[in-house]
Image: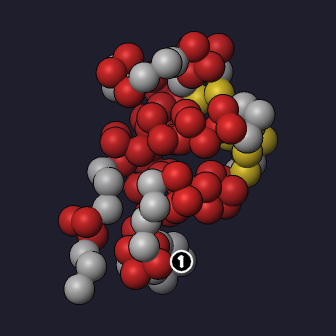
């Protein structure tokens, strides 16, 4: 049975989100980011459906924290509600080893 421990931690989602945003032209809605993370990371439907609370899944919760950590580190911007974009620093990232949070 899949559990929350089987999902990537929030900080480990920053690099996949960078990749997803690059593939999306540098900007995407939060729901699109979450959907593309599932494809990029090949996350099973069982893991995707693990609830965090009544309003969102554990993956949605962790990706929201990843976006917050990445914004604080200067990699992401939040130009509109539920819209996320790569900053100049985020656009220059070439590997997960470069990420500092």
Q: Determine which residue is flagged by label 1.
A: 55
Residue 50 visible to an observer of this rendering? yes
Task: Please state the horizontal and vertical placement of residue 37, each as a whole percent of the image.
Answer: 53, 54
Q: Is residue 15 left or right of residue 33?
A: left
Task: Please state the horizontal and vertical placement of residue 25, each as a whole percent of the image.
Answer: 77, 34
On screen, 75 above or below 7?
above
Task: Please state the horizontal and vertical placement of residue 29, each as a whole percent of the image.
Answer: 73, 51
Q: Is residue 99 left or right of residue 86?
A: left
Q: Dividing the image into 4 quarters, which one contains the C terminus? A: top left
On screen, 98 above or below 31?
above
The residue positioned 65% from the left and 28% from the top of the image is 86
Image coloring type: secondary structure
Q: Residue 48 sits in which quadrant?
A: bottom left
On screen, 46 above or below 60?
below
Task: Please state the horizontal and vertical placement of residue 89, each as a whole percent of the image.
Answer: 57, 14
On screen, 93 above or below 57?
above
């Amino acid at each position: 049975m899949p559990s929350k421990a089987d999902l990537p931690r929030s900080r480990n989602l920053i690099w996949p989100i960078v990749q997803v945003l690059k593939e999306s032209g540098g900007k995407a809605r939060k729901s699109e980011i979450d959907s593309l993370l599932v494809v990029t990371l090949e996350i099973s439907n069982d893991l995707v459906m693990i609830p965090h609370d009544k309003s969102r899944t554990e993956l949605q919760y962790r990706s929201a924290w990843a976006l917050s950590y990445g914004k604080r580190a200067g990699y992401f911007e939040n130009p509109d509600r539920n819209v996320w974009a790569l900053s100049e620093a985020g656009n220059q990232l070439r590997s997960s080893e470069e990420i500092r949070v």
